Amino acid sequence: MPSVGKRLTLHGSGFGLIAPSVLINNISQGVVANIIHPHRAARRADGHASSLVLTDAKFLPGMEGGPVSWEENGELAGISMLPIRATLKTTVLMEARQAVVMVQVGQTWASGVVVSKHGHILTNAHVFTSFLDNISNRTHPNLRGGVSLRVRIDSPQQQQWVDGCELVFVSESCWDVALIKIPETCILAGFLPYLPLRTKQELDKSIVNGTPLFAIGHGIFGPSSGVLPLITSGICSRVVHHNQQPAMLLSSAPVHRGNSGGVLVTTEGHFAGLVTGNGKTSTGRTITHLNFAIPLEAISDAINAYLVDDDRKWLDRLNTPSTRIDDIWSLRGTAPVWEPLEKGNIASDIQS
């Protein structure tokens, strides 16, 4: 019989169709988190009730309908169902996803987010670093000869590759920001879904620790797959501030290769940050549930000013962050300074 805390095992084939030889028949373990008993009228003649068992075991798409067994004896405990999910404003998330594009430079791909109806796209500077020529500067960048830049737009009707995109700006500072623009000859120019960069005055609430966030980007699946941007969920793990302004967002929403230049959005579908990458261990192992993002407040003024008059002096401001901002993004911390306590104040400090 099920009881809260009893260990069980889920059997299934999460993502099994992607690589059947690897992903078919895997397991996930957890405990009974709760038991939902039916109304008494639904009890069987033998007096036992058919219960709904809730578990904290990790559940992957494709495991629906798999058997669930008790860990202690291997006996069948039930059949897995769809996981319970919180009710979200999925419409706004779908609208936000339409503003996320795939950026391909050479044979490398990344993500980008459309931030204006005229086709300006924010992405990461590190995507272009190895493809720039040695003559141009980052405020007027040029790609090496033979290196192409194109963008895939996933409109509701169809996917469309747009060639001949302009590389407008590539930051050379810790602000890992690049700006590209689709040509005005593109049939979708002026009709693209986009995520506006709201100003500080327009923000209804700031991102704080624990704020639910969604990462949207072209992680895992490359240009030949045709897969739409992935949406993963998490929270804001921490906001790092400098001079009382957000300088870095840490999020638990999983991101993977290809998510660089993607976007973090709120539950309302608003732009919260530009994804730059994952945490990594000293051995190079990627930590998918720890990602870094540039907060909206750090870049909105410069980008929005450029979108008004096309003057690149506004973008050049992103090349001159303060030394402390550079330290934050280089993960160079300063040890905390502890003030010594006077002997006579120790008791009063403890009591307070």
Image: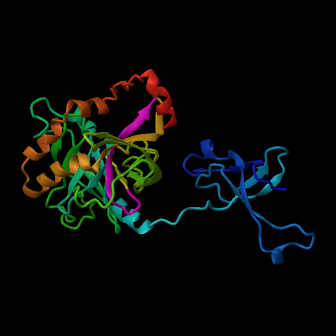
Instruction: Using the image as rendered, state which of residue 133 and residue 199 is in the foreground.
Output: 199
User: Left or right: 123 with respect to 95?
Assistant: left
Occupied quadrant, residue 44:
bottom right
Residue 145 visible to an observer of this rendering:
no
Q: Image point 34% across, 29% down: which residue?
A: 331
Which residue of the protein is positioned furthest toward the right in this rendering? 46
Above or below residue 8? Residue 349 is above
Occupied quadrant, residue 125:
top left
Residue 311, image x, y percentages: 6, 49
Above or below residue 256? Residue 341 is above
Q: How many marks?
A: 0
Residue 112, image x, y percentages: 29, 50
Is 298 colored magenta in this rendering?
no
Magenta residues (range):
266-283
Instruction: Using the image as rendered, state which of residue 106 and residue 286 is in the foreground.
Output: 286
Residue 206 visible to an observer of this rendering:
yes
User: Left or right: 221 with respect to 164?
Assistant: right
Which residue of the protein is positioned furthest toward the front in this rendering? 344
Q: Image point 45% across, 24% down: which residue?
A: 344
